[in-house]
Amino acid sequence: MFYGHAALLAPVLFLSPLFICKSSAQITGSAGASLFRGNCAFCHGSNASGGRGPNLLGALSHSDHPEALEKVIKEGVPGSAMPGFDFEPEELAALLSYLKTVRQGNGSTARVPGDPVAGRAVYAKQGCSGCHMVNGEGSVLGPDLSRAGGARSYDYLKESILTPSADIPDEFRAVRVVTADGKTISGIRINEDTFTLQLRLLDQSFHSFTKATLRTIEYPIESLMPPYKLSEADLTNLLAYLTTLRADPADPAANAIKVESIH
């Protein structure tokens, strides 16, 4: 009986290959989409429009030539959260093909609103360099912003200013301790093991604690960076400035503000 049913179905299957087979391009696109969702979407967004990582639909810091994209995917971006990936050649080809497809017709040419020169003044006025560094100038308490515009999406940068606790990089999470004499100290964890804890304090100094001597150790979910309440103009201008920061920190001149090149 089972053989009989198979015999009845077989002609339908063999006579209708167009309904059950995909082209090689479709297979490649599907594989590339799966690879993107599994490895890239967490940072770049499910539709590649950006998130913790930059928008991949518009202008790219490292060029959109296949060779440049392949280099970034394989080697990562030094000084950023972008790691290198060890894909098989066919996987890499599928991912590059997918990125080419989603970028076609989706490149954003809209200018970022605001005045980056005025935004740089807002950055200075708000004392951002007390925690952040741009091209070797500033502090290392918070993330280096030398590549902020190339490494983060516009929306992510905006959220980081208004709601900094929404997404805190692991290497900048705060630790709060209470010493034996009742003193409360907060800082960024540099190292921790079973017996000791090393923090970078708010004044940029380092302090090592023996855990056994501490009353409490807490790991707050809040960022040490306070949420900023800026005027709409100041916020827009500050974001315009941050968007211009796309260069390698070792090449400060490359971050010179060029308003006409901001997208």
Image (tube, rainbow, N blue to C red):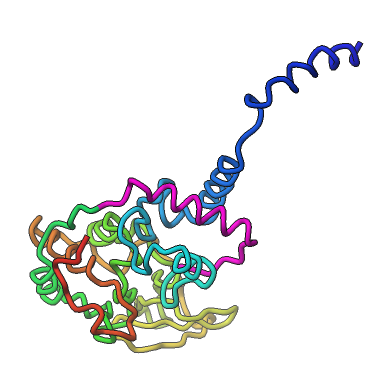
Q: Does the magenta stretch include residue 101?
A: yes
Q: Does the magenta stretch include residue 204?
A: no
Q: Residue at x 89, y 15 (%)?
A: 2
Instruction: Judge left or right: residue 95 versus residue 223.
Output: right
Instruction: Judge left or right: residue 164 versus residue 111.
Output: right
Return the x and y of residue 194 as percentages of the image width and height: 60, 78
The span picked out in magenta is 82-108
Return the x and y of residue 232 as percentages of the image width and height: 10, 55
State which quarter of the image contains the C terminus: bottom left
- What is the quadrant of residue 146 in the picture? bottom left
- What is the quadrant of residue 155 in the picture? bottom left
Instruction: Judge left or right: residue 202 versus residue 46.
Output: left
Q: Which residue is drawn at 68% across and 26% down?
A: 17
Say above or below: 4 vs 92.
above
Return the x and y of residue 184 as percentages of the image width and height: 35, 76
Q: Which of 197 and 15 is in front in this view?
A: 15
Q: Which of 70 and 168 is in front in this view?
A: 70
State which quarter of the image contains the N terminus: top right
Q: Nearer the viewer, residue 71 or 200?
A: 71
Return the x and y of residue 30 as percentages of the image width and height: 56, 43
Q: Residue at x 39, y 60 (%)?
A: 53
Q: Residue at x 8, y 69 (%)?
A: 118
Q: Nearer the viewer, residue 229 or 23?
A: 23
Q: Which residue lies furthest to the front in this view?
A: 15
Q: Give the number of callouts.
A: 0
